[in-house]
Amino acid sequence: MKKSLDQIGFLPEERGLYLDMTIKEQVLYFASLHGFDLKIAAADLPLWMNRLSVKGNEKSRIKNLSKGNQQKVQLITVIVRVW
């Protein structure tokens, strides 16, 4: 049961993102905080951006994204660590 609970999270309305970072910097930063392999996270990022139809590219700054695209990036920071 505890292991299952460790896999559950939530995505708050307010985004906990660093606005001056690029999408790639953001995803790799959160992946590193959780000890995830950064090479895998970097390789998976384009796949998730495509699947979620994130506008922009890996070098786009978070502050330049719409609220919806920021939320998609926030979701990617979670997915890329557990997928």
Image (tube, rainbow, N blue to C red):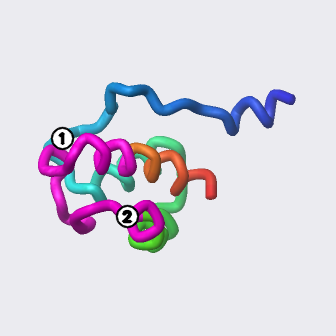
Q: Tell me residue 54's x, y (percent).
A: 33, 61
Give the residue type that dot 1 points to.
Answer: Leu
Quadrant of the image containing the C terminus: bottom right
Does the magenta-highlighted stretch encompass residue 74? no
Residue 49 placed where, x, y %? 39, 65
Residue 7 placement (x, y as % from top left): 69, 38
Disc 2 versus disc 1: nearer the observer: 2
Task: State the residue position of label 1.
Answer: 19
Residue 19 in the image: above or below residue 25: above
Does the residue at mark 2 contact the one at mark 1 (Cβ under 8 Å)?
no
Q: Name the N-terminal-most of marks 2 and 1.
A: 1
Q: Give the residue at x 33% y 31%.
A: 16
The residue that label 2 is drawn on is 53
Q: Residues within 10 Å of mark 2 (few under 14, many from 20)?
A: few
Tell whether position 64 is magenta: yes
| Depth check, front residue: 24 or 14 | 14
**Range of residues picked out in magenta:** 49-73
Q: Residue 9: x, y in percent?
A: 59, 32
Q: Residue at x 23, y 38 (%)?
A: 18
Label 1 sits on a secondary structure element that is loop
Task: Please count the marks in the image.
Answer: 2
Disc 2 element? loop
For residue 28, what is the image quadrant?
Answer: bottom left
The answer to whether residue 67 is above or below residue 10 is below
Left or right placement of residue 41 versus residue 3 in this view: left
Q: Tell me the residue at 14%/44% (across/down).
A: 63
49, 44: nearer the viewer: 49
Q: Is residue 63 left or right of residue 50?
A: left
Residue at mark 2 to residue at mark 1: CA–CA distance: 20 Å
